């Protein structure tokens, strides 16, 4: 099996970061991944889906840890055959604690580097560098057992980075962090592609995190990929030219009344911001004309975009099927989320 | 900790060669040894005890070999009998020291990793279950062999060195491979079997309790049963089986053991069988952990 290859303008072949073709994984009678086909690229890719959507199974297949039917390529390598090479070129930051007791951060990261094939000296140098990058320079000689949750998250990031991965899988990297630590972690993640030249696959339930850092998204539901593309595409598929966000200098309510009288549907979200659904065949000119007539000044006008959260719920809702699952509501614990194997 | 400041320390992408996957078990072996060496109570204390025991035994061998002792003992140049007995008897204390060392070195090896979630750490990398198992076994065996193999071998070499003449040296030469064989079997026992218990439960304390129960309590029970019924039952007692092999190889027949005549073949089969089952358990557990550890449970 070969990876699907894209041709650049110069004719050079560039494999997708992740390329899935008919990927199927069954646990007995349960189908965890059902003929998943997708080509995934991007710098920071959000992997989204309710519990039981198949994210973890997909991850294991991509790392070559589970046998499967179909094809799964990572960096152009077939996961079932080249799992070891893929794992050398991929970093994984687990959600749960995965430390060896009695070790300091620098010992753990050095060990991680050596296990990924680096010579000892190189592994040690890169362990220091990765811990510096993760902001643990002062604490790196202390035993990890005594670290706070935020520091442990940083160690997990550092150990995933130490061997210079080309793709970094991050599983709930901001779980359990206070707002400031969460912001710092997200900043580290945002900076990684440019500073380290690696792509990131971010598996998370926290959709604001995805909105904040991701440029691409893959949404999974009931063992299938429901969406794969850019965040703009995800939100933009719902955005139409007739749905606008208008910011005025003052008195959005008065503009709303005027536009309603002209046939639009309006919702005032603040004294200066107005959401407008234009009537059929109308354009944004109607807003400017109405504002001018009412003596109001339009400061900003844009097509209304869905939030990632709304787009995510919509994608899940659209794919629920007859008598399907309820929409995805409870983000962190999801007691009502779809069942099935992980 | 820094507040979001990012340091790169002149970062450059690694372009050198990587260690082959087939040799990564050595990294685990080295790590296993380094972690045990870190503290006094894990391994160093038991190694020092073994060195002391070896030193004292060599001193006794030397003292019994001197002409002054022989004259005082009235043996007129004949070497006393207990010099010949010292080598197989020394196994008694080497076994005990190796057993205590195995509690701190071997038993926590897999159970500790299960307890701390370290399998996710290991198997997110290009590591195969067999690399993990071989690395752990090799690391623990390297340490325990310093007690149960190097000790008896040092005694055998010392015994050889204290020979009266060349004929005696030649006559005693087979002692060396015998000591090696006994040491190898002992290393297998105190490495593989506790590691098997380590893989059965995911808590260090429980694994230690299981190994102590099996080695001490179950061993004593089958030993007593063997004396009352068939010696084959007693071959399940690991320490007794090892002693049986040692006494046979040193060609020593002790009066107190007449009621427990375990066949040597049964003793060897028992040791190899129990070690094989234990290694099988470790392999099963590690394979399972590899598939479930990364990315959450399935």
Image (cartoon, coloured by chain):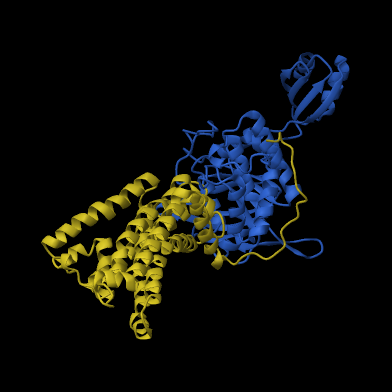
Chain colours: A blue, B yellow
Q: Which residue: 34% across, 65% down?
A: B60
- Tag count: 0
Residue A237 image offset from top left, x and y in percent: 69, 40
Q: Which residue: 54% across, 34% down?
A: A328
Q: Would residue B207 be found to the left or right of residue A74 on screen? A: left
Q: Nearer the viewer, residue A68 or A162?
A: A162
Q: Quadrant of the N terminus of chain B?
A: top right
In this view, the residue farthest toward the bottom is B167
Q: Nearer the viewer, residue B94 or A160?
A: B94
Residue A226, located in which quarter of the rendered image? top right
- Residue A41 against residue A149 in the figure, above or below: below
Residue B178, located in which quarter of the rendered image? bottom left
Q: Would residue B24 be found to the left or right of residue A9 on screen? A: left
Q: Would residue B11 be found to the left or right of residue B287 on screen? A: right
Residue A232, located in which quarter of the rendered image? top right
- Residue B221 against residue A269 in the figure, above or below: below
- Residue A40 against residue A12 in the figure, above or below: above
- Residue B184 against residue A28 in the figure, above or below: below
């Amino acid at each position: 099996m070969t990876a699907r290859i894209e041709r650049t303008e110069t004719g050079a072949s560039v494999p997708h970061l992740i390329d899935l073709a008919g990927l199927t994984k069954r646990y007995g009678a349960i189908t965890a991944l059902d003929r998943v086909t997708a080509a995934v690229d991007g710098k920071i890719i959000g992997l989204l889906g309710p519990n039981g959507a198949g994210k973890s199974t997909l991850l294991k297949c991509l790392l070559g840890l589970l046998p499967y039917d179909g094809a799964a390529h990572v960096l152009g390598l077939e996961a079932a055959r080249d799992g070891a090479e893929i794992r050398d070129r991929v970093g994984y930051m687990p959600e749960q604690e995965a430390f060896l007791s009695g070790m300091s951060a620098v010992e753990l990261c050095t060990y991680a580097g050596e296990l990924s094939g680096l010579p000892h000296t190189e592994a040690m140098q890169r362990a220091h560098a990765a811990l510096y990058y993760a902001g643990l320079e002062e604490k790196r000689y202390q035993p990890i057992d005594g670290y706070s949750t935020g520091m442990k998250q940083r160690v997990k990031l550092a150990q995933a980075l130490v061997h210079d991965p080309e793709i970094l899988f991050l599983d709930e990297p901001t779980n359990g962090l206070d707002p400031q630590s969460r912001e710092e972690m997200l900043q580290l993640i945002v900076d990684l592609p440019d500073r380290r030249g690696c792509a990131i696959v971010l598996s998370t339930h926290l959709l604001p995190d995805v909105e904040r850092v991701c440029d691409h998204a893959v949404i999974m539901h009931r063992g299938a990929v429901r969406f794969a593309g850019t965040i703009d595409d995800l939100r933009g598929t719902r955005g139409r030219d007739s749905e606008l966000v208008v910011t005025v200098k003052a008195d959005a309510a008065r503009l709303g009344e005027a536009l309603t009288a002209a046939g639009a549907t309006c919702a005032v979200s603040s004294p200066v911001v107005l959401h407008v659904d234009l009537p059929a065949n109308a354009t944004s000119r109607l807003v400017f004309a109405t504002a001018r007539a009412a003596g109001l000044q339009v400061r900003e006008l844009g097509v209304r975009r869905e939030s990632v959260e709304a787009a995510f719920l919509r994608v899940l809702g659209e794919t629920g099927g007859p008598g399907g699952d309820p929409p995805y509501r409870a983000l962190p614990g999801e007691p009502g989320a779809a069942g099935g194997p992980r | 900790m820094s507040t979001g400041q990012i340091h790169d320390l002149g970062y450059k992408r690694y372009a050198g060669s990587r260690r082959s996957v087939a040799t990564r078990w050595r990294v685990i072996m080295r790590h296993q040894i380094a972690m045990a060496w870190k503290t006094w109570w894990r391994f160093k204390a038991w190694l020092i005890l073994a060195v002391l025991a070896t030193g004292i035994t060599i001193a006794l061998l030397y003292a019994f070999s001197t002409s002054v002792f022989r004259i005082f003992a009235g043996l007129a140049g004949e070497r006393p009998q207990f010099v010949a007995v010292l080598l197989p008897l020394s196994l008694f204390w080497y076994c005990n020291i190796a057993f205590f060392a195995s509690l701190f070195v071997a038993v926590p090896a897999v159970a500790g990793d299960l307890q701390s979630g370290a399998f996710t750490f290991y198997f997110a990398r290009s590591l195969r279950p067999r690399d993990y198992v071989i690395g752990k076994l090799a690391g623990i065996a390297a340490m325990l062999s310093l007690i149960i193999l190097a000790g008896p071998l040092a005694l055998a070499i010392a015994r050889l060195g204290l020979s009266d003449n060349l004929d005696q040296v030649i006559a005693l030469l087979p002692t060396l491979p015998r000591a090696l064989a006994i040491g190898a079997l002992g290393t297998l026992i105190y490495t593989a079997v506790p590691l098997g218990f380590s893989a059965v439960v995911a808590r260090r304390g429980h694994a230690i309790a299981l190994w102590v129960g099996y080695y001490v309590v179950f061993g004593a029970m089958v030993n007593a049963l063997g004396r009352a019924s068939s010696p084959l039952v007693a071959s399940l007692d690991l320490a007794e089986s090892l002693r049986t092999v040692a006494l046979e190889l040193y060609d020593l027949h002790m009066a107190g053991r007449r009621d427990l005549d375990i066949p040597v073949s049964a003793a060897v089969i028992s040791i190899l069988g129990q070690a094989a089952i234990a290694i099988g358990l470790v392999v099963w557990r590690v394979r399972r952990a590899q598939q479930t550890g990364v990315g959450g449970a399935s």
